[in-house]
Amino acid sequence: MTRRYQATDGGGYRVTRLDADLPPTPLERVVIVAGMARTGSSLLSSQLASTGCVGMPREYLNPIITASTSVEWGLPRESLRGHVGHIRRRLRGDDNWQKPVRFTDRSFGEYLRLLANRRTTPNGVFSMKTFWDQWEKGFVNTGQKLDVWNAPITWVRLTRTDIVAQAISYSRAMQTGQWSSNAESKGRPVYNETRIANLIEYFEHQNTSWDRYFQAIGVEPYVVHYESLAESTTETVSGLLGWLGFPDARPAPPSSRRQSGTESAEWQQRFLKSHHAQ
């Protein structure tokens, strides 16, 4: 059976679509947006991509996307261990038996360079967005070096001050499948205090991991706060573009809106009241 994937990132963008390929351009610079789920990464990425001068920042290390490119592009290549796991999942009747989960370290480096060859804008910039668990699994754990692209890297970090709201937003999105305001909800979310508490712990770990990583590589990234991005999108993105060296770039009007509403606020009040009482 031929395996086929229509993998999209958080913004509904099909990563392997051929019409997204750009003419081969010498790579001069890499921009990496380091974030977490529910920090506005899809909004920021679409804004940067719309300028035509900051690459095409997509979630290229998302396991669903690497599974798609593995089939459609031939990279990264599934490792022997991954292939055995693939067969075992199929024999067990697992629904996700088709999804490769392990790739060879060497082919992952080839994949990263292939991305730059296909997604570098005419001014020589390649960009991507990534979450810590994706970066750790797809880059750090496969032994990649920061010079894999043979180009300087500029780091942008996305954070969210209100981690409780972040956890609630993620909990709701997981249940409804509504990862952006442009998507349709597939069901009504149910409040689960334990799930929210676990997600807060998860996001705290993500934050700490990024902190330690940047300290280890000696980098101080440009920080974009979700709250500023959501409330003043154009001004926040323009400030980042100026810092990146593109003060004249003009992003397109944002096509999505902030998703939080009355029910999310009620969940937050309920959660905080419960935990203050403990």
Image (spheres, rainbow, N blue to C red):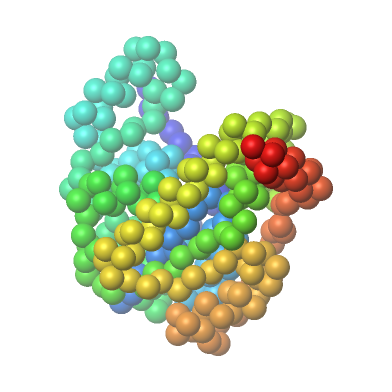
Q: Nearer the viewer, residue 186 or 239?
A: 239
Give the residue at x 60% y 45%: 167
Q: Nearer the viewer, residue 154 or 20?
A: 154
Instruction: Work out which quarter of the rendered image holds the N terminus and state it.
Output: top left
Image coordinates for residue 58, horizontal then vertical, percent? 47, 57
Residue 50 appears in view: yes
Give the residue at x 46% y 20%: 95
Report the side of 154 relative to 13 (left or right). left
Give the residue at x 36% y 17%: 90
The image shows residue 141, relative to residue 31, as above or below, that is: above
Q: Residue furthest top?
A: 92
The quadrant in which residue 197 appears is top right
Image coordinates for residue 103, horizontal then vertical, percent? 26, 39
Residue 120 appears in view: no
Q: Nearer the viewer, residue 177 or 7?
A: 177
Instruction: Work out which quarter of the rendered image holds the C terminus and state it.
Output: top right
Q: Residue furthest front?
A: 278
Report the side of 119 relative to 106 (left or right). right
The image shows residue 6, relative to residue 237, as above or below, that is: above
How many marks the image carries: the answer is 0
Image coordinates for residue 252, horizontal then vertical, percent? 64, 72
Report the side of 235 relative to 262 (left or right). left
Report the side of 173 relative to 27 (left or right). right
